[in-house]
Amino acid sequence: MKIVALFPEYVEGEENQILNTKKAIGLKPFLEEKGHELVILTDGEADLDKHLADMDIVISAPFYPAYMTKERLEKAPNLKLAITAGVGSDHVDLKAASENNVGVVEVTGSNTVSVAEHAVMDLLILLRNYEEGHRQSVEGEWNLSRVGNDAHELQNKTIGIFGFGRIGQLVAERLAPFNVTIQHYDPINQKDNEHSKFVDFETLVSTSDAITIHAPLTPDTDTLFNNDVLSKMKEGSYLVNTARGKIVDTEALVKQLESKHIQGYAGDVWYPQPAPADHPWRNMPRNAMTVHYSGMTLEAQQRIEEGTKDILNRFFNNEPFQDKDVIVDGGQITSASYNAK
Ligand SMILES: NC(=O)c1ccc[n+]([C@@H]2O[C@H](COP(=O)([O-])OP(=O)(O)OC[C@H]3O[C@@H](n4cnc5c(N)ncnc54)[C@H](O)[C@@H]3O)[C@@H](O)[C@H]2O)c1
Protein backbone atom coordinates (compact mmCIF):
# COMPACT_ATOMS: atom_id res chain seq x y z
CA MET A 1 0.00 0.00 0.00
CA LYS A 2 1.04 3.59 -0.48
CA ILE A 3 1.06 5.57 2.73
CA VAL A 4 1.58 9.33 2.61
CA ALA A 5 2.64 11.20 5.74
CA LEU A 6 3.10 14.87 6.56
CA PHE A 7 5.37 15.56 9.52
CA PRO A 8 7.16 18.67 10.83
CA GLU A 9 10.55 19.35 9.29
CA TYR A 10 13.63 17.62 10.75
CA VAL A 11 16.17 20.03 12.25
CA GLU A 12 19.78 18.85 12.54
CA GLY A 13 20.82 18.32 16.16
CA GLU A 14 17.29 18.17 17.58
CA GLU A 15 17.52 14.41 17.92
CA ASN A 16 14.95 13.87 20.70
CA GLN A 17 12.10 14.90 18.43
CA ILE A 18 10.63 11.81 16.73
CA LEU A 19 7.67 13.47 15.06
CA ASN A 20 9.56 14.85 12.07
CA THR A 21 10.48 14.14 8.46
CA LYS A 22 13.61 12.17 9.39
CA LYS A 23 12.47 9.96 12.25
CA ALA A 24 8.79 9.87 11.20
CA ILE A 25 7.83 8.19 14.52
CA GLY A 26 9.66 5.05 13.34
CA LEU A 27 7.23 4.42 10.50
CA LYS A 28 9.77 3.92 7.71
CA PRO A 29 11.26 0.59 8.90
CA PHE A 30 7.91 -0.44 10.39
CA LEU A 31 6.10 -0.09 7.05
CA GLU A 32 8.90 -1.15 4.72
CA GLU A 33 9.43 -4.46 6.48
CA LYS A 34 5.74 -5.16 5.85
CA GLY A 35 6.23 -4.38 2.15
CA HIS A 36 4.47 -1.01 2.10
CA GLU A 37 5.66 2.27 0.60
CA LEU A 38 5.96 5.33 2.86
CA VAL A 39 6.11 8.72 1.20
CA ILE A 40 7.08 11.51 3.58
CA LEU A 41 6.04 14.88 2.20
CA THR A 42 8.92 17.31 2.19
CA ASP A 43 7.23 20.41 0.83
CA GLY A 44 4.41 20.73 3.36
CA GLU A 45 0.91 20.44 2.02
CA ALA A 46 1.92 21.47 -1.50
CA ASP A 47 3.23 17.95 -2.16
CA LEU A 48 0.07 16.27 -0.97
CA ASP A 49 -1.92 16.87 -4.16
CA LYS A 50 0.63 14.92 -6.23
CA HIS A 51 -0.16 11.73 -4.33
CA LEU A 52 -3.95 11.92 -4.06
CA ALA A 53 -4.55 9.75 -7.13
CA ASP A 54 -2.94 6.60 -5.74
CA MET A 55 -2.53 6.86 -1.98
CA ASP A 56 -4.18 4.31 0.32
CA ILE A 57 -3.55 5.90 3.73
CA VAL A 58 -2.76 9.46 4.79
CA ILE A 59 -1.13 10.23 8.13
CA SER A 60 -0.59 13.63 9.72
CA ALA A 61 -0.37 15.20 13.15
CA PRO A 62 -2.67 18.07 14.17
CA PHE A 63 0.40 20.20 14.98
CA TYR A 64 1.22 20.23 11.26
CA PRO A 65 -1.94 19.00 9.57
CA ALA A 66 -2.52 17.68 6.08
CA TYR A 67 -5.86 19.37 5.42
CA MET A 68 -7.99 16.65 3.82
CA THR A 69 -10.69 18.82 2.30
CA LYS A 70 -13.76 17.57 0.43
CA GLU A 71 -11.99 18.36 -2.87
CA ARG A 72 -8.92 16.37 -1.90
CA LEU A 73 -10.96 13.42 -0.61
CA GLU A 74 -12.88 13.32 -3.88
CA LYS A 75 -9.61 13.19 -5.82
CA ALA A 76 -8.30 10.23 -3.79
CA PRO A 77 -10.19 7.16 -5.09
CA ASN A 78 -7.92 4.62 -3.34
CA LEU A 79 -7.87 6.37 0.04
CA LYS A 80 -9.20 4.11 2.78
CA LEU A 81 -7.91 5.63 5.98
CA ALA A 82 -6.85 9.01 7.39
CA ILE A 83 -4.82 8.59 10.58
CA THR A 84 -4.35 11.46 13.01
CA ALA A 85 -1.00 11.03 14.75
CA GLY A 86 -2.33 12.74 17.86
CA VAL A 87 -5.78 13.91 19.00
CA GLY A 88 -8.23 16.11 17.05
CA SER A 89 -9.22 15.11 13.50
CA ASP A 90 -10.91 18.31 12.33
CA HIS A 91 -8.23 18.78 9.63
CA VAL A 92 -10.13 16.05 7.79
CA ASP A 93 -13.54 17.05 6.41
CA LEU A 94 -15.34 14.37 8.42
CA LYS A 95 -18.61 14.59 6.49
CA ALA A 96 -16.81 14.23 3.16
CA ALA A 97 -14.72 11.36 4.59
CA SER A 98 -17.97 9.56 5.56
CA GLU A 99 -19.44 10.17 2.11
CA ASN A 100 -16.30 8.84 0.41
CA ASN A 101 -16.05 5.85 2.76
CA VAL A 102 -12.71 6.93 4.18
CA GLY A 103 -12.17 5.88 7.80
CA VAL A 104 -10.77 8.45 10.25
CA VAL A 105 -8.94 7.30 13.38
CA GLU A 106 -6.78 9.09 15.92
CA VAL A 107 -4.58 8.19 18.90
CA THR A 108 -7.13 9.21 21.52
CA GLY A 109 -5.64 9.89 24.94
CA SER A 110 -2.04 10.05 23.69
CA ASN A 111 -1.40 13.65 24.74
CA THR A 112 -4.25 14.57 27.05
CA VAL A 113 -2.06 15.03 30.16
CA SER A 114 0.41 17.16 28.19
CA VAL A 115 -2.39 19.47 27.04
CA ALA A 116 -4.03 19.64 30.47
CA GLU A 117 -0.71 20.66 32.05
CA HIS A 118 -0.23 23.29 29.34
CA ALA A 119 -3.70 24.76 29.93
CA VAL A 120 -3.04 25.07 33.68
CA MET A 121 0.31 26.71 32.88
CA ASP A 122 -1.45 29.15 30.50
CA LEU A 123 -3.96 30.12 33.19
CA LEU A 124 -1.13 30.87 35.62
CA ILE A 125 0.88 32.76 33.01
CA LEU A 126 -2.10 34.98 32.22
CA LEU A 127 -3.32 35.64 35.76
CA ARG A 128 0.16 36.32 37.14
CA ASN A 129 0.97 38.65 34.20
CA TYR A 130 4.05 36.51 33.57
CA GLU A 131 4.49 37.67 29.98
CA GLU A 132 4.98 41.31 31.05
CA GLY A 133 7.34 40.34 33.88
CA HIS A 134 9.40 38.21 31.50
CA ARG A 135 9.41 40.88 28.80
CA GLN A 136 10.84 43.41 31.26
CA SER A 137 13.53 41.01 32.42
CA VAL A 138 14.67 40.35 28.84
CA GLU A 139 14.42 43.97 27.69
CA GLY A 140 16.36 45.52 30.60
CA GLU A 141 13.38 47.16 32.36
CA TRP A 142 12.32 47.20 36.03
CA ASN A 143 8.81 48.68 36.04
CA LEU A 144 7.04 47.06 38.99
CA SER A 145 3.84 49.09 38.78
CA ARG A 146 3.39 48.06 35.20
CA VAL A 147 3.64 44.36 35.96
CA GLY A 148 1.96 44.43 39.39
CA ASN A 149 -1.05 46.37 38.11
CA ASP A 150 -2.40 43.27 36.34
CA ALA A 151 -1.03 40.43 38.48
CA HIS A 152 -3.56 38.22 40.29
CA GLU A 153 -3.67 35.07 42.36
CA LEU A 154 -5.44 32.08 40.88
CA GLN A 155 -7.05 31.12 44.19
CA ASN A 156 -10.70 32.08 44.73
CA LYS A 157 -11.25 32.64 41.00
CA THR A 158 -14.02 30.92 39.03
CA ILE A 159 -12.63 28.86 36.18
CA GLY A 160 -14.94 27.74 33.36
CA ILE A 161 -14.13 24.64 31.35
CA PHE A 162 -15.72 24.47 27.91
CA GLY A 163 -15.79 20.79 26.88
CA PHE A 164 -15.57 18.37 29.79
CA GLY A 165 -14.09 15.28 28.16
CA ARG A 166 -10.69 13.71 28.76
CA ILE A 167 -8.65 16.92 28.79
CA GLY A 168 -11.30 19.11 30.43
CA GLN A 169 -11.59 16.69 33.36
CA LEU A 170 -7.80 16.43 33.76
CA VAL A 171 -7.63 20.23 33.89
CA ALA A 172 -10.26 20.31 36.65
CA GLU A 173 -8.35 17.68 38.63
CA ARG A 174 -5.12 19.69 38.34
CA LEU A 175 -6.76 23.05 39.16
CA ALA A 176 -8.66 21.84 42.23
CA PRO A 177 -5.70 22.15 44.67
CA PHE A 178 -5.39 25.85 43.76
CA ASN A 179 -8.58 26.45 45.73
CA VAL A 180 -10.66 27.70 42.83
CA THR A 181 -14.33 27.31 41.91
CA ILE A 182 -14.61 25.16 38.80
CA GLN A 183 -17.60 24.95 36.47
CA HIS A 184 -18.04 23.30 33.09
CA TYR A 185 -20.29 23.23 30.06
CA ASP A 186 -20.56 20.15 27.83
CA PRO A 187 -23.64 19.00 25.86
CA ILE A 188 -22.91 15.34 26.70
CA ASN A 189 -21.27 15.49 30.10
CA GLN A 190 -23.87 17.44 32.07
CA LYS A 191 -23.12 15.94 35.48
CA ASP A 192 -21.28 17.64 38.34
CA ASN A 193 -18.16 15.79 39.48
CA GLU A 194 -16.09 16.13 42.64
CA HIS A 195 -14.16 19.08 41.21
CA SER A 196 -16.58 20.84 38.87
CA LYS A 197 -20.22 21.86 38.60
CA PHE A 198 -22.17 21.69 35.34
CA VAL A 199 -23.61 25.04 34.22
CA ASP A 200 -25.29 26.14 30.99
CA PHE A 201 -23.22 27.86 28.32
CA GLU A 202 -24.51 31.38 29.11
CA THR A 203 -23.61 30.99 32.80
CA LEU A 204 -20.17 29.62 31.95
CA VAL A 205 -19.49 32.59 29.68
CA SER A 206 -20.85 35.33 31.93
CA THR A 207 -19.60 34.19 35.36
CA SER A 208 -16.12 32.74 34.77
CA ASP A 209 -13.01 34.77 35.59
CA ALA A 210 -11.18 32.59 33.07
CA ILE A 211 -12.42 30.08 30.51
CA THR A 212 -10.36 27.23 29.11
CA ILE A 213 -11.55 25.56 25.89
CA HIS A 214 -11.36 21.76 25.52
CA ALA A 215 -14.03 20.85 22.95
CA PRO A 216 -13.34 19.57 19.44
CA LEU A 217 -13.76 21.79 16.40
CA THR A 218 -17.17 20.85 14.93
CA PRO A 219 -19.79 22.78 12.93
CA ASP A 220 -21.28 23.76 16.35
CA THR A 221 -18.04 25.05 17.90
CA ASP A 222 -16.62 26.66 14.74
CA THR A 223 -16.07 30.36 15.70
CA LEU A 224 -18.53 29.90 18.58
CA PHE A 225 -16.45 32.37 20.61
CA ASN A 226 -17.39 35.22 18.27
CA ASN A 227 -17.73 38.90 19.12
CA ASP A 228 -21.14 38.37 20.72
CA VAL A 229 -19.94 35.58 23.06
CA LEU A 230 -16.62 37.29 23.85
CA SER A 231 -18.42 40.49 24.78
CA LYS A 232 -20.61 38.51 27.23
CA MET A 233 -17.52 37.26 29.08
CA LYS A 234 -16.76 39.05 32.36
CA GLU A 235 -14.97 42.36 32.00
CA GLY A 236 -11.25 41.74 32.47
CA SER A 237 -11.51 37.94 32.18
CA TYR A 238 -9.10 35.54 30.48
CA LEU A 239 -9.42 32.97 27.74
CA VAL A 240 -7.23 29.92 27.18
CA ASN A 241 -7.57 27.77 24.08
CA THR A 242 -5.53 24.64 23.56
CA ALA A 243 -8.33 22.95 21.60
CA ARG A 244 -8.52 24.47 18.11
CA GLY A 245 -7.83 28.01 16.89
CA LYS A 246 -10.98 28.21 14.78
CA ILE A 247 -13.25 27.87 17.85
CA VAL A 248 -12.41 31.55 18.52
CA ASP A 249 -13.09 34.26 15.93
CA THR A 250 -9.69 35.66 14.93
CA GLU A 251 -10.58 39.32 14.45
CA ALA A 252 -13.17 39.51 17.25
CA LEU A 253 -10.58 38.30 19.75
CA VAL A 254 -8.06 40.95 18.69
CA LYS A 255 -10.76 43.62 19.09
CA GLN A 256 -11.74 42.40 22.58
CA LEU A 257 -8.09 42.38 23.70
CA GLU A 258 -7.50 45.85 22.27
CA SER A 259 -10.49 47.23 24.17
CA LYS A 260 -9.25 45.37 27.30
CA HIS A 261 -12.63 43.68 27.74
CA ILE A 262 -10.62 40.44 27.60
CA GLN A 263 -7.53 40.83 29.78
CA GLY A 264 -5.44 38.05 28.25
CA TYR A 265 -5.44 35.14 25.83
CA ALA A 266 -3.19 32.10 25.74
CA GLY A 267 -3.04 28.91 23.80
CA ASP A 268 -1.15 27.02 21.14
CA VAL A 269 -3.71 26.47 18.40
CA TRP A 270 -4.19 28.61 15.31
CA TYR A 271 -6.05 28.67 12.04
CA PRO A 272 -4.60 27.90 9.62
CA GLN A 273 -1.54 25.94 10.68
CA PRO A 274 1.29 26.63 10.30
CA ALA A 275 0.15 30.17 11.15
CA PRO A 276 1.40 32.73 8.61
CA ALA A 277 4.07 35.16 9.88
CA ASP A 278 1.53 38.00 9.84
CA HIS A 279 -1.24 36.14 11.70
CA PRO A 280 -2.87 38.81 13.92
CA TRP A 281 -2.64 36.61 17.03
CA ARG A 282 1.16 36.74 16.94
CA ASN A 283 1.18 40.41 17.95
CA MET A 284 -2.14 41.05 19.68
CA PRO A 285 -1.97 42.65 23.14
CA ARG A 286 -1.46 40.55 26.29
CA ASN A 287 -1.22 37.22 24.53
CA ALA A 288 0.75 34.21 25.73
CA MET A 289 0.55 32.27 22.48
CA THR A 290 2.94 29.51 21.53
CA VAL A 291 3.22 27.46 18.38
CA HIS A 292 1.12 24.28 18.48
CA TYR A 293 3.11 21.99 20.75
CA SER A 294 1.17 21.51 23.99
CA GLY A 295 0.36 17.93 23.00
CA MET A 296 3.80 17.24 21.54
CA THR A 297 5.93 16.58 24.62
CA LEU A 298 8.47 13.79 24.18
CA GLU A 299 6.32 11.53 26.37
CA ALA A 300 3.29 12.23 24.18
CA GLN A 301 5.29 11.67 20.98
CA GLN A 302 6.22 8.22 22.24
CA ARG A 303 2.57 7.37 22.84
CA ILE A 304 1.65 8.80 19.43
CA GLU A 305 4.22 6.49 17.82
CA GLU A 306 2.88 3.43 19.66
CA GLY A 307 -0.75 4.35 18.93
CA THR A 308 -0.16 5.03 15.23
CA LYS A 309 1.59 1.67 14.82
CA ASP A 310 -1.25 -0.04 16.68
CA ILE A 311 -3.78 1.54 14.29
CA LEU A 312 -1.74 0.46 11.24
CA ASN A 313 -1.29 -3.09 12.56
CA ARG A 314 -5.02 -3.43 13.14
CA PHE A 315 -5.76 -2.09 9.66
CA PHE A 316 -3.29 -4.46 7.93
CA ASN A 317 -4.55 -7.44 9.99
CA ASN A 318 -8.21 -6.60 9.35
CA GLU A 319 -8.84 -6.25 13.08
CA PRO A 320 -11.21 -3.66 14.57
CA PHE A 321 -9.69 -0.41 15.83
CA GLN A 322 -9.97 0.45 19.51
CA ASP A 323 -13.40 2.11 19.91
CA LYS A 324 -11.88 5.17 21.58
CA ASP A 325 -9.78 5.91 18.45
CA VAL A 326 -12.55 5.81 15.84
CA ILE A 327 -13.95 9.09 14.52
CA VAL A 328 -15.40 8.00 11.15
CA ASP A 329 -16.21 4.41 10.28
CA GLY A 330 -18.50 2.62 7.81
CA GLY A 331 -19.59 5.86 6.15
CA GLN A 332 -20.59 7.59 9.40
CA ILE A 333 -19.16 9.94 12.01
CA THR A 334 -19.30 7.61 15.00
CA SER A 335 -17.41 9.65 17.63
CA ALA A 336 -19.76 10.95 20.33
CA SER A 337 -17.59 14.04 20.82
CA TYR A 338 -17.85 15.02 17.15
CA ASN A 339 -21.62 14.35 17.12
CA ALA A 340 -22.33 16.31 20.34
CA LYS A 341 -25.14 18.83 20.02
N1 LIG B 1 -3.26 21.50 21.52
C1 LIG B 1 -3.04 20.21 21.37
O1 LIG B 1 -1.91 19.78 21.18
C2 LIG B 1 -4.20 19.25 21.48
C3 LIG B 1 -3.94 17.92 21.81
C4 LIG B 1 -5.01 17.05 22.02
C5 LIG B 1 -6.31 17.49 21.80
N2 LIG B 1 -6.53 18.77 21.43
C6 LIG B 1 -7.92 19.24 21.18
O2 LIG B 1 -8.68 19.06 22.36
C7 LIG B 1 -9.94 18.51 22.01
C8 LIG B 1 -10.48 17.74 23.19
O3 LIG B 1 -9.68 16.58 23.43
P1 LIG B 1 -10.16 15.44 24.44
O4 LIG B 1 -9.15 14.38 24.39
O5 LIG B 1 -10.56 16.03 25.75
O6 LIG B 1 -11.49 14.97 23.68
P2 LIG B 1 -12.77 14.26 24.30
O7 LIG B 1 -13.50 13.70 23.13
O8 LIG B 1 -12.38 13.33 25.40
O9 LIG B 1 -13.59 15.46 24.95
C9 LIG B 1 -14.19 16.47 24.20
C10 LIG B 1 -15.41 16.95 24.95
O10 LIG B 1 -15.93 18.08 24.25
C11 LIG B 1 -17.34 17.98 24.30
N3 LIG B 1 -18.01 18.78 23.27
C12 LIG B 1 -18.33 18.42 21.99
N4 LIG B 1 -19.03 19.41 21.41
C13 LIG B 1 -19.14 20.40 22.32
C14 LIG B 1 -19.79 21.67 22.31
N5 LIG B 1 -20.47 22.08 21.24
N6 LIG B 1 -19.72 22.42 23.42
C15 LIG B 1 -19.02 22.00 24.53
N7 LIG B 1 -18.43 20.79 24.60
C16 LIG B 1 -18.48 20.02 23.51
C17 LIG B 1 -17.63 16.50 24.16
O11 LIG B 1 -18.93 16.18 24.59
C18 LIG B 1 -16.53 15.89 25.00
O12 LIG B 1 -16.95 15.67 26.33
C19 LIG B 1 -9.64 17.65 20.77
O13 LIG B 1 -10.80 17.46 19.99
C20 LIG B 1 -8.60 18.45 20.07
O14 LIG B 1 -9.19 19.35 19.15
C21 LIG B 1 -5.51 19.66 21.27
Image (cartoon, helix red, strand yellow):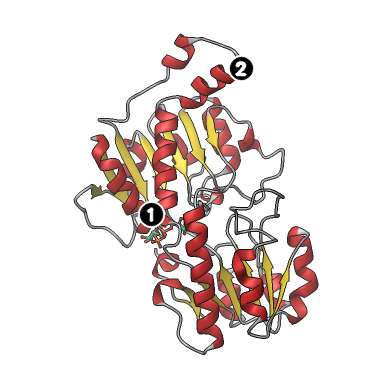
Q: Does 91 appear above or below 319?
A: above
* Crowd class of label 1 (few under 14; some 14 to 19; many from 20; radius 10 Å): many
Q: Nearer the viewer, residue 256 or 217?
A: 217
Q: From the top left corner, tell me how far across and down residue 18 is, in percent.
A: 60, 59
Q: Give the residue at the far left of this rendering.
A: 194
Taking 57 as reference, is 152 left or right? left
Q: Nearer the viewer, residue 155 or 331?
A: 155
- Tell whether circle 1 marks a residue whose Cβ is less than 8 angstroms from ligand 1: yes
Q: Which quarter shows the C terminus?
A: bottom left
Mark 1 or mark 2, whichever is nearer to me: 2
Q: Which residue is mark 2?
A: 139
Which residue is located at x 43 percent, y 68 percent?
339
Q: Which mark is residue 32?
A: none
Q: Secondary structure at mark 2?
A: helix
* Residue 175, quarter of the rendered image: top left
Q: Which residue is mark 1?
A: 167
- The reply to whether residue 92 is in sight is no
Q: Quadrant of ligand 1?
A: bottom left
